[in-house]
Image (cartoon, rainbow, N blue to C red):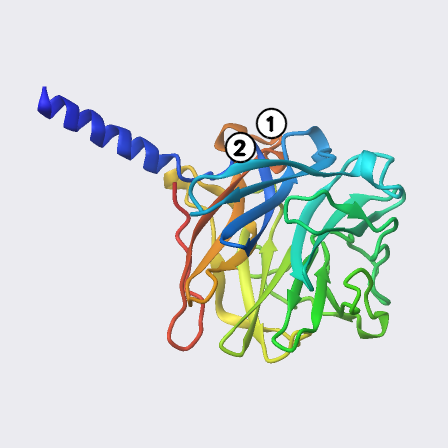
Amino acid sequence: MKKLFLSLLALTCLSAAAQHNPILPELHADPDIIADGGRYYIYSTTDGAAGWGGYYFTCYSSKDLKKWEYEGIILDVLKDTKWARNKGNAWAPAIEKKNGKFYFYFSADQGERKAIGVAVSDSPTGPFRDLGHPIVDKRPNGQMNGQQIDVDVFTDDDGQSYLYWGNGYMAGAKLNSDMTSIDTTTIVRMTPRGGSLKDYQYREAPYVFKRKGIYYFLWSVDDTGSPNYHVAYGTSTSPLGPIKVADEPVILQQRPDQKIYGTAHNSVLQIPGKDKWYIVYHRINPAYLDKKDGPGFHREVCIDPMEFEKDGRIKPVTPTN
């Protein structure tokens, strides 16, 4: 009986370990994460709607990055905005805390084109109040294609914040001190040039962070519905580039032997006060891998450790279950 109990306990532990990824219930994608007040908060695209038709954003929180609690809907673009009420397409949020307030940036459908908005709250769980109009609603000068989606925000050591965005191109600009508008004179196209779908050809989802004086730029390659969807990176000495593509740029990609596919559109978490890092990303739910089942909008959020070489290079991340 004792051996049976121990065997059952071991199986239970293994089962619990196998449940670690994905970390959120149901279907979510395009996650961003923030640490505040001893807790971690994740915001994401609400997935599972045909044609990426989700129209609201939720928040989950955790003390230990393992057990996540549902904090509710923090923004419904059909109800809570004046400019994005035609349909859903509430995608790819970013969160930033500054001067005691939380700024929630998101992509939505303005009607004629995709645009980026911002909502503000005194709490990481809301309620968030929309600005009332987009802060980015057109391509940068000279950019002939692409969408205004996949927003990211980075605040440098000097307190200056920057906005990044773009599908089909990557753009960046300084945020003004109000955090709800950009300095249009600083807009720069930053798209990493070259590469292929096998390595670093830019598609979307820029993400920026800084470590030991180096600015790291991460982005997603290929289509979000492709098993090949993966993360590449480069570095710079400036928050607005230019970006030097890493010699070994691919740092996160599928593991078919583990039924892990389409690992990309990430954010990065540094444990406060420590040189300890995690990458938070989505992958395709393997039950929807066939194109007819809509793999591009049946995704799930995962987290894995991210480590660095002594010279600052990012080590390839092994996505896990």
Q: Is residue 117 left or right of residue 278?
A: right
Q: Nearer the viewer, residue 158 or 165?
A: 158
Label 2 CA crowd tier, 10 Å (few <14, some 14–19, many 20+): many
User: Where the N terminus falls, by quadrant?
Assistant: top left
Q: Is residue 114 left or right of residue 222?
A: right
Give the x, y percent position of residue 314.
45, 66
Give the x, y percent position of residue 258.
38, 39
**Residue drawn at the location 68% of the way across and 63% of the way down:** 98
For mark 1, give the secondary structure.
helix
User: Where the C terminus falls, by quadrant?
Assistant: top left
Identify the image quadrant of residue 47: top right
Q: Measure the C-alpha gap from mark 1 to mark 2.
A: 7 Å
Please give the label number shown on residue 232.
none
**Residue drawn at the location 49% of the way across and 55% of the way down:** 279
Label 1 CA crowd tier, 10 Å (few <14, some 14–19, many 20+): few
Give the x, y percent position of residue 265.
59, 50
Q: Nearer the viewer, residue 132 or 257?
A: 132
Q: Is residue 103 above or below residue 172?
A: above
Task: List the residue tagged with mark 1.
Answer: 293
For mark 2, give the secondary structure.
loop
The amino acid pointed to by label 2 is Leu
Contact, mark 1 vs mark 2 (Cβ under 8 Å): yes
Q: Is residue 160 visible?
A: yes
Q: Is residue 319 left or right of residue 112?
A: left
Q: Is residue 95 above or below residue 13?
A: below
Give the x, y percent position of residue 179.
77, 63
**Residue drawn at the location 71% of the way across and 68% of the way down:** 162
The amino acid pointed to by label 1 is Asp
Q: Is residue 229 visible?
A: no
Please give the label number shown on residue 289.
2
